[in-house]
Image (tube, rainbow, N blue to C red):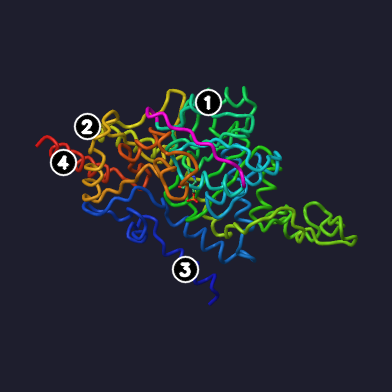
Amino acid sequence: MSINNLVDDFLESLDPTNEDLFSYLANKGWSNGDPIYYSGPYWDQKEISAAIGSLLNAKWLSSGEQVNKFEVEFSRKFEFKSSLMVNSGSSANLVMIAALKEYFEWDDYDEIIVCACGFPTTINPILQNKLKPVFVDIDFDDLNWSLDELEKKITNRTKALFSSPVLGNPYDMDKLFEIINQYKIHYIADNCDSLGSKWKGDYLTKNSVASSCSFYPAHHITTIEGGMVSSNIPEVISLARSFAWWGRACYCVGAQNKLSNGVCGKRFSKWLQNYDREIDHKYVFSVQGYNLKPIDMLGAIGLVQLSKYDHIHRIRRQNKDKLSDIFEKIPGLRVVKEKTNAETSWFGVPIVCDDDDPKSTLKSQLVQFLEENKLQTRNYFAGNILKHPAYKGMEDPNDFPNASKVLDNVFFVGCSPVITEAMIDRIEEIVDNFVINLSN
Ligand SMILES: Cc1ncc(COP(=O)(O)O)c(C=O)c1O
């Protein structure tokens, strides 16, 4: 019996209605009293079939036709001209900044403005590419960077604003677009938490020179690990591909690699200025690259997940609304809302405890209570990133008081579709008990 037959039998035995089969995944097969994961793979037998199918049918197994199909479909869905899949959102940021620096010919230590409160691998690629991050404090109302503060940080060395909306929730994008037009600087989107979020009906990434996205299991769609760089400037994606593929100049992707003369039709040409014979373009290195390629299986999983995106977006929004109502029963607590022009694809539910009370212990009490009752909570990432050892000496953390307040007053819970109605009922019970304890 061939391995294909064995696997066909196995796949046929996967009954999609049998919850127990997938009980190894976050929150599957949940019953009252079990932990409630804040997110996780929202999977069924389709992802398993696609993953195994790609292992059986690919000739090379590493990044190939499935990854390329996913890149094309992802671009179509989220309205980009071109995309490149890599092995994580952090890698996406790394090659995106490298490609933009090369494309726009930025000098070393040109300035990129970022939020002082967020995820480390939005900032690290700026440093790793020998650029200078310039930090901006947040506005405590929506927890996003303050655009007034941002404007004050613009200098004649500012090349771009690297935006990352908090838990997917857009700030006033009209004002951001005014700023980039007025000062002639670029807008780069770290879209890892905001895949599919919109402003006035357009994806947030529409006016960006490039954007990144993560497929880690906590995110909107997952390929286990994985990330994407997308742009409407195809040359930026070709450069990002070179950085992700060892620095290679050749830009053949997927099935194009089967063309013996390459998609350019001149694979074997005199590519090197200092060597007057023909050389294979696949072995011409135009930038100092890395190897950040995904395996082909991740592309196959991504294609299935992409087909579920609209459903996932809807459930995340519904769960966010239900959980907001539940948590807002707690005195002194508010949940951040979306702005009128926004359609947020929520990554999580941002919870602010006792905004104006620096001595408040509500966050620590509540987080402890939720965790004891097996509801996963998460810090809003790093809080003030400048307080962390890796960024010591860069700028004074005390200049960013609102970002510091995040550590004391803000946390989030999940709203992913792995959280079902029954779990939401349980969360309501836990929160009600917390309120009762408070009043006793
Ligand atoms: C805003 C932001 N940027 C980048 C990343 C990094 O993505 P990955 O974990 O896929 O490397 C994350 C991860 O959660 C993130 O939230």
| Amino acid at the residue labelled 1 | Lys
| Amino acid at the residue labelled 3 | Asp
- Rendered image: mark on residue 433: 4
Does the segment drawn in magenta span residue 159? no
Q: Residues within 10 Å of mark 1 (few under 14, many from 20)?
A: few
| Amino acid at the residue labelled 2 | Lys
Q: Nearer the viewer, mark 2 or mark 3?
A: 2
**The magenta segment:** 130-142
Q: Position of residue 101 (x, y in %)?
A: 66, 42
Question: Which secondary structure class fits the magenta region best?
Answer: loop
In primary-sequence order, the first of circles 1 and 3 is: 3
Q: Nearer the viewer, mark 2 or mark 1?
A: 1
Q: Is residue 349 above or below residue 339?
A: below
Ligand 1 has an atom within 8 Å of the beta carbon of the residue at disc 2? no
Q: Position of residue 159 (x, y in %)?
A: 63, 34
The residue where tag 3 is placed is: 9
| Amino acid at the residue labelled 4 | Asn
The front one of 10 and 102 is 102
In three-dimensional space, the C-alpha distance between marks 2 and 4, rounded to whole angstroms, equals 11 Å
Identify the image quadrant of the C terminus. top left
Indicate the secondary structure of the residue bearing disc 2.
loop
The front one of 189 and 10 is 189
